[in-house]
Image (cartoon, grey):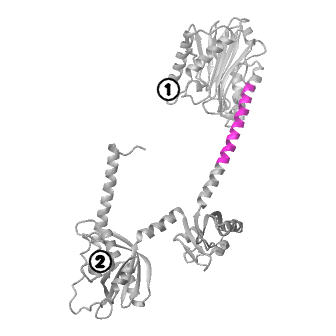
Amino acid sequence: MERATGVHGRLALRAVAELLATQRNRVDSYARAHAPPAAPARTASTPQASAPPPGHQELLEALSSAAMLVTPMPDEHGEITDFMFVAQNARARRYAKDHVPADAVPPWTGPVPLSHRFPTLVDSAFFRLLVDTHRDGLPRGPESVEWILTRPHHPPVLLNNEVRVAPCGSHLLITWEAGSRVRMARAAQNLVKTCWAEWNLTDGTVVPSLGFGSVLGLAEDAPVPDLPGLAALITPESVAGLHAALYDVLLRERPAECELHLPGVPERTVRMVAEPVHPPTGPVWAVRAVLVDVTDDRRRRLRAEAAHSEARRQRARAETLAEIADILRDAVLPRFTGELGSYGLEAAAVYRPAKGATVGGDWYKARRLPGGRLLIALGDARGHGLTAVTLMAKLRYALAGLGYTDEPVDTLTHWLNEMACDDGTESTATAVIARFHPERGLLRWTCAGHPRPVLLRDGRAVQLPPPEGGPGPALGVLSGMSYRVVDTPLVVGDMVLLYSDGLIERRDTDPDEDTARLLRAAEQCLREAAPGPGHAGLQDYTERLLDRLDGPHRTDDATLLAVRRVVPGMG
């Protein structure tokens, strides 16, 4: 992806900056609106806090975390109203330097009430911790405390700490660390559904991470399981894998992994990777492990495998159907021999399926009938694949049988329509059905919702006029329809082109433009090279014409059938 350095990129960055600035202003306004009033100045009658015990500073400096010492400040009724901030260690001063802006609190000059130095702490959970610990003498924490420091001319500062409070004589000892680390660690473990734990084999204690119970799906108040307890939690089928992993860790002293399945709806799957913990020369005394909840991953993998398997099955089925359709098409489409030439006609055909699609329902026929007449037809059955080829074969063989009745071509079309209607609503097709009468040089044809034929004569290509009243509907649409006949006399050298709509149709183009494109292409092919004699010459012209009209734009099957009037016996 390109970096956002253009105009749109700069606008987007500016929008983000403005959004953040607006939100900071909201936070600033909220903090100022909810800031507590300044604490009243204390009079001489206010009870004073007791002095810190001797050696208190050495005690504070010995602690490994930031620490401060406070003492309760009761009112005349003994109620705690504030706490005197009397001492802090170097780590506390370093924390203030790193996290607390200089203009947020006054400089430290000695003991000061907390409400004076940090007014917003009075209404926070921090103040409650101090009061409760002073009341019952029990240590508390760690507890997450969030509070805001307001600043006169700058945005407020949000602080988050993990705080502990413990009694220390008449004082309270407060220790803390930046809470974001603990919170982010917990959030990270929940986000990736990962935890860790260390099981001590000597005393049976377990040291878990914050997200341990969540990964195993335990209740919040559930005890942390030891290794036997973990084995009791999982399904019986998983115990053997856990045993094998522990065997490798404890006896072979090498890392191992296994999958733990915990019963439930749905079943939870946890991947466990464990390693031994031991002194350099002693035995393994603890097992340290990382556990990852892979339930969703396993579920996605199973769905992907099922989808892949189904895709393979469907692809194999499609390939089988396509192969059957190709075989069936090859079996039913004619291979022209020289038999038509003795009746004054030559025929050639080209068929090309749609790009990337299975074979379609285009079909054609040109054959001799009893009595010396010739049956010529081209149609397009609905759909693609085996269904379309099956319908195509039905129509083609039905027409061949009906043609032996010697009935007029309009009657043949009517009968074929009735058969398609009886076959069901899916059995629809378009077609041009013709009969050539050699003794009169007459082509009599009907049109059932199909593009009309094109006549090439003396180098000119024209589309034949429609039947009186227009073409009839497609086959299989309306029962009881009659179809009008068009008589087209042919002279020697004339060519008639029958074609499927896939040959000429383009997306978002006018049908008249499509037809005009066909007429121009037919004439251009004639000018470039007139069809040679015999079937081979006509076949060459037919293939050149289809090549000229074909291209990546085509989305349907394309079929072109060309018939040429010749001197009887010369084909």
* Quadrant housing the N terminus: top left
Residue drawn at (68%, 7%) of the image: 566
Residue drawn at (74%, 12%) of the image: 338
**Image quarter for residue 23?**
bottom left
- Percent position of residue 168, x then y: 39, 88
**In the image: residue 181, left or right of residue 328:** left
Determine if the magenta segment contains residue 357: no
On the question of residue 131 being in view, the answer is yes
In this view of the protein, which residue sits in the foreground, 380 or 256?
256
Question: In this rendering, is residue 195 above or below 463?
Answer: below
Task: Determine the CA span between mark 2 and mark 1.
Answer: 80 Å
**In the image: residue 149, left or right of residue 346:** left
Judging from the image, what secondary structure is the residue with disc 1 in?
A: loop
Question: In this rendering, is residue 134 above or below 283?
Answer: below
Q: Are marks 2 and 1 in contact (CB under 8 Å)?
A: no
Question: Which span is picked out in magenta?
Answer: 308-332
**In the image: residue 116, left or right of residue 135:** left
Say which mark, if any, is on residue 510.
1
